[in-house]
Image (cartoon, rainbow, N blue to C red):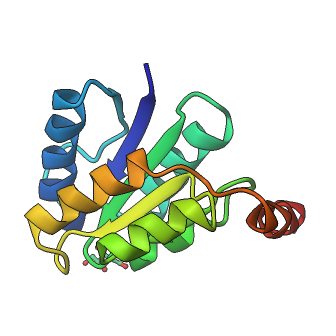
C-alpha cells in the first residue's frame, strides 16, 4: 500500500481534508501531519514535517497545501532529497512526474478550485517517471 503524507497550514486546511478523503477512497494510506483546524498556523513547520516524512522514507509521497501553495513548497524543497512541485494544471502535474520525478506535490487552497485540485492529485499519483535523460538531471538535483 502506498503511503501519502499530507500537511497544510490554515489556508490549505479545507483542501487538505478533502484530499485525505479522496486518497482514502482510492486506497492510499494517509499520514495526516496537520494542521487540524482552520486556526492560523505557520506554513514552514508543516512543509518541513511533511518533507521529512518523505525524505526519511516513512511516506512514499507527500502533498502539501497552503493558501497559494508557494510558501509551503519553498519550505518542503529545503529538505534534502525533496522535489516538491507546485502544480496548477493537469499538464504541470503530469510533467512534474514524467520529467522531475517530483516526490511531493504542492497545491494552493485559495487559488486552485477543488475539483481541479483533486484531479491534479490523481494525475500526479498515477503518472510514472520517464527516466532516461531526465534521470541524469534529477541526479544532478539530488547532488545539490
Ligand atoms: C497564509 O495567510 C498564507 O500566507 C499562506 O497560506 C501561503 O499562501 C503562503 O505562501
Return the x and y of residue 22 as percentages of the image width and height: 17, 40
Query: Quadrant holding ligand 1?
Result: bottom left
Q: Residue at x 29, y 50 (%)?
A: 122
Q: Residue at 27% of width from left, 47% of height from top?
A: 35
Instruction: Name above or below for residue 86 compared with residue 103.
Output: below
Residue 52 in sight: yes
Q: Quadrant of the rendered structure where residue 4 is? A: top left
- Compared across the picture, whether 126 is left or right of 40 comes to right
Question: The C terminus is located in which quarter?
Answer: bottom right
84 to 67, vertically: above or below: above
Q: Quarter of the image containing the N terminus?
A: top left
Which one is in front, 83 or 136? 136
Residue 67 position, x and y percent, is 25, 74
Residue at image x 29%, y 79%? 68
Q: Quadrant of residue 87?
A: bottom left
Q: Nearer the viewer, residue 38 or 142?
A: 142
Any part of residue 8 in sight? no
Tell me if 23 is positioned left or right of 43 in this view.
Answer: left
The image shows residue 54 at horizontal and vertical percentages of 58, 41
Give the residue at the far top of this rendering: 1
Q: Residue at x 36, y 44 (%)?
A: 6
Amino acid at each position: 500500500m502506498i503511503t501519502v503524507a499530507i500537511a497544510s497550514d490554515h489556508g490549505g486546511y479545507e483542501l487538505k481534508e478533502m484530499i485525505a478523503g479522496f486518497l482514502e477512497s482510492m486506497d492510499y494510506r494517509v499520514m495526516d501531519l496537520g494542521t487540524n483546524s482552520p486556526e492560523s498556523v505557520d506554513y514552514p513547520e508543516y512543509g518541513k514535517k511533511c518533507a521529512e516524512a518523505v525524505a526519511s522514507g516513512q511516506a512514499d509521497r507527500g502533498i502539501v497545501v497552503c493558501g497559494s501553495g508557494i510558501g509551503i513548497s519553498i519550505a518542503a524543497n529545503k529538505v534534502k532529497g525533496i522535489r516538491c512541485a507546485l502544480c496548477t494544471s493537469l499538464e504541470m502535474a503530469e510533467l512534474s512526474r514524467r520529467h522531475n520525478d517530483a516526490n511531493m506535490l504542492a497545491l494552493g487552497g485559495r487559488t486552485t478550485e477543488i475539483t481541479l485540485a483533486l484531479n491534479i492529485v490523481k494525475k500526479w499519483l498515477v503518472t510514472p517517471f520517464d527516466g532516461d535523460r531526465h534521470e541524469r538531471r534529477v541526479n544532478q538535483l539530488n547532488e545539490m
